[in-house]
Image (cartoon, rainbow, N blue to C red):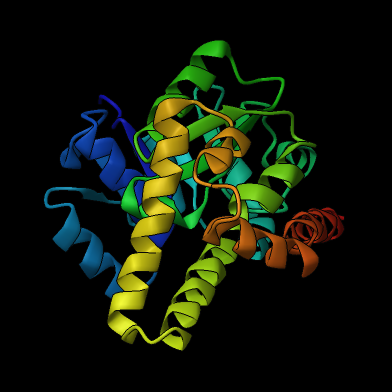
Amino acid sequence: MSKLAFGFLGGGQMATAIARGAVQAGVAANNDIAFCDTNLTQIALLVEKFPGCVLASSPSDLFAKCDRIVLAVKPQTLVDISVGLSAYITPNHLLISIAAGVSLSKLTSSLGTERIIRVMPNTPCQSLEGASGIATASGASPEDFEWCKSIFSAVGTVVRVTEDQLHGVTGVSGSGPAYVLMMIEALSDGGVMAGLSRQAALELATQTVLGTAKMVQETGTHPAILREQVTSPGGTTIAALSTMERAGFRSAVIDGVMAAVKRSRELAG
C-alpha cells in the first residue's frame, strides 16, 4: 500500500495552518494528508477544512499510513507519549517536531531514532506569513531537510539554524508576534489619544506595521536606512523617535528578546 504524503499527530491551529499552506502550495492534496487527534470537535473542523483528508484512528495507524509525520502536540504531551510512539517508528520515518523546548537529544533518546527535525514556527503561519527556524538531528538527510523546508516555506519564511540557536528564534520570531501586537495596540492607543476613532486608529496602526514589514522584506534595505528616509530634520518623526529613545524603547525590545531566550533555555532544562 502506498504511503500518504505526510501526517499530523495533533490537529490544532498550527497543524491546520501547515496543512493549509502545503495544500495551497501544491505540496500535497487534501486526500494525501492524515490527521490523528482525540478531540472530536477538532476532528470535525479538520474534515470541514480539508475535505477528503485521512483520519488516523490511532498513533499506530498514523505511523502505518505515513512515513513523514509532524509531531504537533503540546510539549508535555509529546514527552509523555514519546516512548510509546517508539514502537511504531521504522527507519523509513521522518519526524518533524514543533514542540517548543523538547530538545533533539530528548527526542532521539525517547523515540529511538535520529531521523528527526525540530522546527520553531510562529502563529502568523496561520496567515501563511510565518517565520520558522529549522534544526536537524544527525540522522536527518539533506533530502529530509529540503522536504521539511518546502512544507514550512509554504506558510512563510524559513531559516536554518543550529539547535542552540532555536532559543534565539524563540526570542525573535516565536514570541515576537506578541511584541508586534503590543506595538500595534500602543500605536492605536496613541491615535485615540490624538483624537482618532478607535477603528481608524487600529486600521492605520495595523496597516503601517504590515506595510513597513513588507517594505523591509521587498527592498532588502536595512531598517536603519529606511528609517532615515522618513526622518526629516526637525520634523515630527525625529521628535517622536527622540522621545521613544529617552524612554528606552530600543533597549526594552532587546531586553525582552533576551528574557524570552533565557526562559526558553530554562524550559529546555
Q: Is residue 180 left or right of residue 196?
A: right
Instruction: Identify the residue at image location x=43%, y=56%.
Output: 209
Q: Is residue 142 above or below residue 195?
A: above
Q: Is residue 169 left or right of residue 226?
A: right
Instruction: Identify the residue at image location x=39%, y=30%.
Output: 218
Q: Position of residue 180 (x, y in %)?
A: 54, 61
Instruction: Identify the residue at image location x=37%, y=42%.
Output: 7
Q: Nearer the viewer, residue 93 or 70?
A: 70
Q: Position of residue 267 (x, y in %)?
A: 80, 60
The quadrant in which the C terminus is found is: bottom right
Q: Position of residue 225 (x, y in %)?
A: 58, 33
Instruction: Identify the residue at image location x=55%, y=57%.
Output: 237
The quadrant in which the N terminus is found is: top left
- On the question of residue 11 being in view, the answer is no
Q: Position of residue 185 (x, y in %)?
A: 49, 75
Q: Nearer the viewer, residue 239 or 37?
A: 239
- On the question of residue 85 being in view, the answer is yes
Q: Is residue 265 above or below residue 165?
A: below
Outermost residue, left side: 51
Question: Within the image, what quadrant is residue 203 found in?
Answer: bottom left
Q: Is residue 222 left or right of residue 107?
A: left
Q: Nearer the viewer, residue 123 or 112?
A: 123
